[in-house]
Amino acid sequence: MAKIDVAIGVVRDRAGRVLISKRKSDTHQGGLWEFPGGKIEQSENDEQALNRELFEELNIRVINSSPLIKINFSYPDLIVQLHVREVYGFDGEVFGREGQRFKWVALHELSDYEFPAANKPILTAIKLEQHYAIIGGNNTREILLELDNVWKQGVGLIQIRAKELCAADAEEALEVVRGKCKELNMTYLINSQMPVKRYLDEGVHLTSADLKLLNQRPQSSGYVAASCHNLQELYKAEQMALDFAVLSPVMPTSSHPEAKALGWQQFKEWVTKVNIPVFALGGISRQDFKKALACGAQGVSGISLYKG
Ligand SMILES: Nc1nc2c([nH]c(=O)n2[C@@H]2O[C@H](COP(=O)(O)OP(=O)(O)OP(=O)(O)O)[C@@H](O)[C@H]2O)c(=O)[nH]1
Ligand SMILES: [Mg+2]
């Protein structure tokens, strides 16, 4: 079957709305909405192809872009590899040069539009933050302090991982932390090893051991994510249709001195093979953020990353 490589751009306006356009009815996946882009030509890399396509289709010049996610998908009639890039700034006024309809859409309204089946992970990645902080503590007060610390740094997505607490203390702490997250508009996932089963269905982060035990995505009204340390675990997270994964340790880390660091090259290689957003974790410093994005990460995650 034919296989094509496609460069796709996530273009946002100042209000954070995303640009989508309608595929002409006589094309592949016609009539559905898409993110602008097109086929990568032989002489081009995905960045060059995206720059060309966005000019040809929308009359804009991309200033800068970086990889968001790569997706491999088989339609009955075509195999596509979508190289999706986040566009950071463009020059010019958007204009549909091919007569296509286009629209700026707020993130929470994207679910009102029908996209090709391959696009599902793009929709997740677009809405997901670029920082995922892991917070903990020995009591409610300590957890709240950590929460406040990451919030002040602009982090909106957290994993609550306070495995040392007994069930009663964990329950008390989570009740408070949950209220605080709602107040601050932060999204939380609870580590699956915390002894508080009744909260897990609001967002759960599976340890790699729990990922191994399960065969189905757990019920949750929020995100379901998992810790992965190898390609097999990433494949399992993808197969279970989890929202995202965290791959570690990318660099040597004092919290897990026994674990061998993957390094960025290995990280990049594995992340490219799965169709879900992946955060880089383990020994990451602030200076590594751009490197992580360039290697295909959704963003970075950490404990000490947000301290001091
Ligand atoms: N542009 C774009 N293509 C997508 C998306 N999702 C998706 O599966 N595709 C598929 O990727 C391929 C890219 O096609 P395209 O039609 O945009 O290519 P192009 O701009 O080079 O068009 P052309 O062949 O008319 O020159 C199509 O088979 C399309 O169905 C998406 O969000 N945006
Ligand atoms: Mg196109």
Image: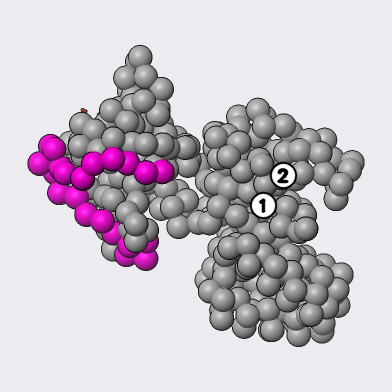
Quadrant (top left, top right, bottom left, bottom right) of the C terminus: bottom right
The picture quadrant where one finds residue 84 is top left
Answer left or right for 66 relative to 133. Answer: left
Do we see residue 289 in this rendering? yes
Q: Residue 91: which disc?
A: none
Inter-mark Cα distance, 2 to 1: 8 Å
- Residue linked to disc 2: 284
Q: Secondary structure at mark 1?
A: strand
CB contact under 8 Å: marks 2 and 1? yes
Q: Is residue 29 left or right of residue 136?
A: left
Q: Residue 59: say if magenta.
A: no
In the rendered image, the vertical position of residue 265 relative to residue 252, given as above or below: above
Residue 298 drawn at (x, y percent): 55, 46
Of pointers 2 and 1, the one earlier in the residue sequence: 2
Expressed as whole percent of the image width and height from the top left, the position of residue 79 reads: 37, 30
Q: Nearer the viewer, residue 282 or 94?
A: 94
The image quarter containing residue 105 is bottom left
Q: Which residues are magenta?
A: 88-110
- The N terminus sits in image quarter: top left
* Residue 93 position in % (x across, y down): 21, 45
Question: Where is mark 1, residue-wise?
Answer: 301
Residue 4 visible to an observer of this rendering: no
Task: Pick the residue in front: 56 or 256.
Answer: 56
